[in-house]
Structures are given as structure tokens and as C-alpha cells.
Image (cartoon, rainbow, N blue to C red):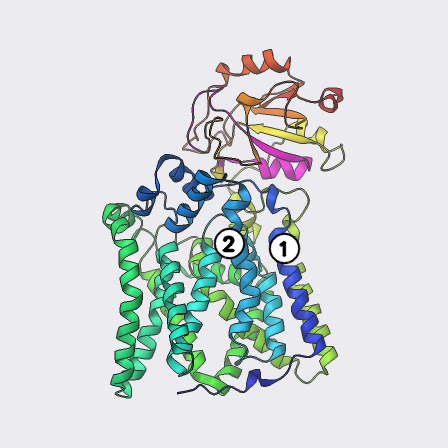
Amino acid sequence: MSAVRTAGTARWSAGWIVIAVLAVAVGVFLRCWQLGDQILLDDEWHAIHKLLHADAADIATHLGLADYSIPLTLYQRFLYTHFSLTEMGLRLPMLLAGIGLIVLAPALLRREATPAVRAIWMLLLALSPFMIYHSRTARPYALTTLLVFVAIVAFREWWLRDAARMRWAVTYVFCAFLSGWLHLITLPFTLLPFIFFGIAALLRRDWRGIGRLLLLGLAVTIPLLLALLPALRNDWAALSAKAGSDSLTLETLYRAALLAFGSANAIVAAVLALLTLAGAAVWWRRERGFVAYIAVIVLGAGAAIALSHPAWVQHPGTYARYMQPAIPFLLLFAAQGFASAIQRFNERLQGNAAIVAAGALFVTGPIPGYSYDPNQFMGHPYFQFDYDAAHNPYRTQLPDGPVSPFYRRLAREPAQSLLLIEAPWSLETNHDPQPLYQRVHRQYVRIGLTSPLCGVRDYGDYAPSDNGMQLSNFVHLDTLVPLDAGGADFLVMHLHAWPPNLPPAPQWPDLAACLPQLEQRFGAPAYRDDEVEVFALSPAGRAMQF
């Protein structure tokens, strides 16, 4: 049978085409700006640690205690083995998926939504801080969001349409399989359509439809079992340890909703929520089956994730990223609500209202607060854990200083005019003060890796002889020489782990073993205090007075 579709029959006008193109341009810019300079942090290192010590077979058959995405890690190991592993290579699939969603999602629902709704939706997708963030990281959430969206739409098209049914079935199976292999947490989203349409078929005694569902279920279950069973068997204990450990709270739900709507401002989020409800009501009057379908999937997946009690789910950011596949649908209904609210305006005023509202949403959101240049730590939880500083433990529980006078001296130089090598470091962001320092000095940063000069480390570090690793924002101290410091002006050696009173302390090398070698190589420090010892590496650095 065919779904009733009337909303998407209107033609695109020039004004909405301009807004759609603007949305794509803005979305690309916000996802790409300073991306090459971003430092890999936290969970982005899980896959690197795995691929440095395991072959492809081992990667494919384990989940790991520090979970990594199996197919994403296999892709990254392919780059590492056959080409070289760079920051852009690590993040490229998610970047393309994040950009692709802005274009593909409205195209897939072109029969259901008017051009105005689709153009406004594109703006909301382009400006979503949470989805921008995940489009810029080496974790799979932007990719799974795109795949889950396509799978949900493809399943419904397969069920409702006689034409191109096999094409939609293949699309669904591919997207549901790959998203589930990328991250198990997506399975509730992609498997709940069977329950929704299965119940509908049972109520109608549609035995042919039930047979079709069983065949499609087998088509998606078999590849999922083949891909996941070896890893589940080998690492079931690790997976079990991370389930049943933490619980949602009402505060979690509320703050996760703020992240999903992209604002720390309760009034802005409330307006978006009301627009979402209004838009869903408009769709309900026109095509209630679609609204019921999305509601069952979103609410069912949310409940399934909550009932599994995954580790750290009490943190809003954790639950929000697990629920990220729901965000495009929330923004779709919000776009419908806004389009309905302005439908009495003429078309030019509607377009202007959409642009003004999108600009206001951007200005009141978190992005302007961390979009200074350079900021190589935009993915740091200091900016992303919670958009409200008063509820962000990285701002309320970690120190905001003191900042060494060395960095304040650099702040008197033109921004972006100097390059610092910072060492040692911790990939764990609760032990990483670099965003605080860069916010003050506004100069470029590279991370100095201390192996083997200060002792061998394998956590957030790798051997300088490893030619497969070509991370441009990391440099080995062992390879630095006075006449070839890679354009760096200063080497900043941090004498102690940060902060000193936060257990457990990160791995920190014995600097007593390597500071004398650095002094022999680069001469006496240009600056020293209780926290840092700084070596000037360039004529510009040596000329500065401290």
C-alpha cells in the first residue's frame, strides 16, 4: 500500500533554495573550521591504542575494555598499514557523514515535507552544536546517526511501497547492519521498526506482511550475528561490566535534552521543544502513522538504553550521544513547527524569519564561546560536557588556574604568531589544562611525545620510528634538534601532572631523566617557574624577554 503524501508536492522557490544552499555552506564551514588543528583527546585514542598492538583479525573479534568501534578501527588500521594514519584520516568518515546528513535527510523525506520545512530543517541540522561536535571527532556517532536515519526511513519505505521494495530492503539491511557493527547502542533504533509494523500486521491479520518481516529480519540478523558473535564471545565479561552499572536521573534527561536542542538557555530550549510538539501535531493531523512510527522508535530506544544501565549514562552527554539518532527527527518536527508558525507571512518574510531565527539560535548557543582562533581543543569536555558552565564539572570541579606567567607573556604577542610544543601530556581531559592555557596565550600548540627520551610510554604515545603514524599535531621530543624544531618556537616542559590533587594521577614520565638532555641540546631554559621549564627553539623565541 502507499502512504498519503501531499506536503512535498510544492516546488522549491528561489528563496528556499538559497536558504538550503546557505545551510549546507554553513554546515560544512562549522564542521571543517580548524579541524586539521584539533588535538586527539580521550576516547579518540581507543582505536589508536588497539591498532598499534593488534592485527585485523584481533580487532574484528574483540570489543576491548576501552571500547573501540570495530569497523572504524579496521578502516583506521588499513590507513595505518597501507598509507599513513593522520588526524584527517581518523575523522573523515564522521565528517562526511555529518555533512551528508544535512543533504540526504531532507532528500529522503522530500515527499513528506514542504520545501520550507526542508530548508529550515537543513538550517537546524547545520547549526546543531551536538552533531557538529560529533562530526569532528574520531568516534562513530555522526556516522551511526546518518546510518540509523537512513535505516529508519528505508524500513518504512520498504513496508509502504510496492515500487523499489527490494532497493529499500537492501538499503535498510546495509545501514542497520553497519550501524550495529559500528556501535551496539544503535540496535534499538534499527530493530524497533519490526515491532511497530509487526504489531500493525498482527492487528490486521496480515500474515503475508508478517512473512515479509520475518524474511527481512533474517536478512539483517545473520550478518549482525556473523560480525558480532566472535567479539561478544571473547569480550562478554568486559561488555557486561559496562552494563547495569549506572542509571538515568531526571536531571540527566533534562540536561541531555538541552544538549540535543543545542542550548544551555532553558528558554531557548523550551521554545524549540514547543515548536517540536507543534510540528509533530501538524504531522499527526496529516500523517499520523509517521509520527507514531518515529515516536515508538525514539521512546522505545530511549527506554531500552536507560534500562540497560550503561556505564556513565548518568552524565547527560553520554545519554545524549547514545540518543543522537533521534535528534534529526526532533529537529524535523521543530522545523515543521516554525514553518507553520510563519506560514501567514509572504515567502520573502518567511525566509528572512528563518535566517534571523537561525542566527539567534547560533548566537545564544555554545559555539561562539569556543570559536576563537586558534582553539585546538573544541572537542574538550570543558566545552562539550555541558553547555551550561554551572553544570559542567570540568569548569566547576577542576581548577581554572593559576596560569603560568609564561603564557600571559605570550598573550602580548600577536595571536597565531607562535608555535608551542607542550610536553608531557595526558590524553585524559580531566588531566589536560591546555584549553585553559590556549584560551590565554592564543598561540598554536603541538603535543610533545616523550617516548623514548623520558622513558617508554604507550598511553597516548607511540614510537618515533613508527612510520604508519603521521599525526601532524604531535611531535616526538627525541627527534627535535636545535636546527630543526619543525617551526616551533618553544618547548614547554610541564614539571608536574595537572591538577596535583586529582586522583588517580596520570602516567607522568620521570623528567629528571630527560631535562638534562634537553638542556644539553637546547641550552639553558628561557623561562622556568614551579610548573614549567621552557626552552626557546627559534630565533623569535630566543629574542623574547621574560
Q: Quadrant of the C terminus?
A: top right
- Residue picked out by circle 1: 30
Which picture quadrant has residue 118? bottom right
- Whether residue 340 appears in magenta in the rendering, the answer is no
474 vs 312, nearest the viewer:
474
- Residue picked out by circle 2: 94
Image vertical order of residue 467 relative to residue 375, above or below:
above
Indicate the amino acid at tag 2: Met
Residue 445: x, y in percent?
Answer: 62, 34
456 vs 311, nearest the viewer:
456
Residue 400: x, y in percent?
Answer: 58, 38
Mark 2 neighbour density, 10 Å: few (under 14) some (14–19) many (20 or more): many
173 vs 369, nearest the viewer:
173
Q: Residue at x 56, y 69 (%)?
A: 270
Residue projecting furthest to the front? 82
Indicate the amino acid at tag 1: Leu
| Segment tinted magenta in the rendering | 431-460
Residue 413: x, y in percent?
Answer: 76, 32
Q: Is residue 25 visible?
A: yes
Image vertical order of residue 413 relative to residue 484, above or below:
below
Q: Is residue 364 visible?
A: no
157 vs 369, nearest the viewer:
157
Q: Residue at x 46, y 26 (%)?
A: 508
Determine which of the numbered discs, if any, sits on residue 89 in the image: none
Provide the secondary structure element on which disc 1 rests. helix
Image vertical order of residue 31 relative to residue 12, above or below:
above
Q: Residue at x 45, y 53 (%)?
A: 140
Q: Quadrant of the N terminus?
A: bottom left
Which picture quadrant has residue 360? bottom right
Task: Say whether disc 1 or disc 2 marks the residue closer to the N-terminus.
Answer: 1
In-image side of 118 versus 303 (left or right): right
**CA distance for labels 1 and 2:** 14 Å
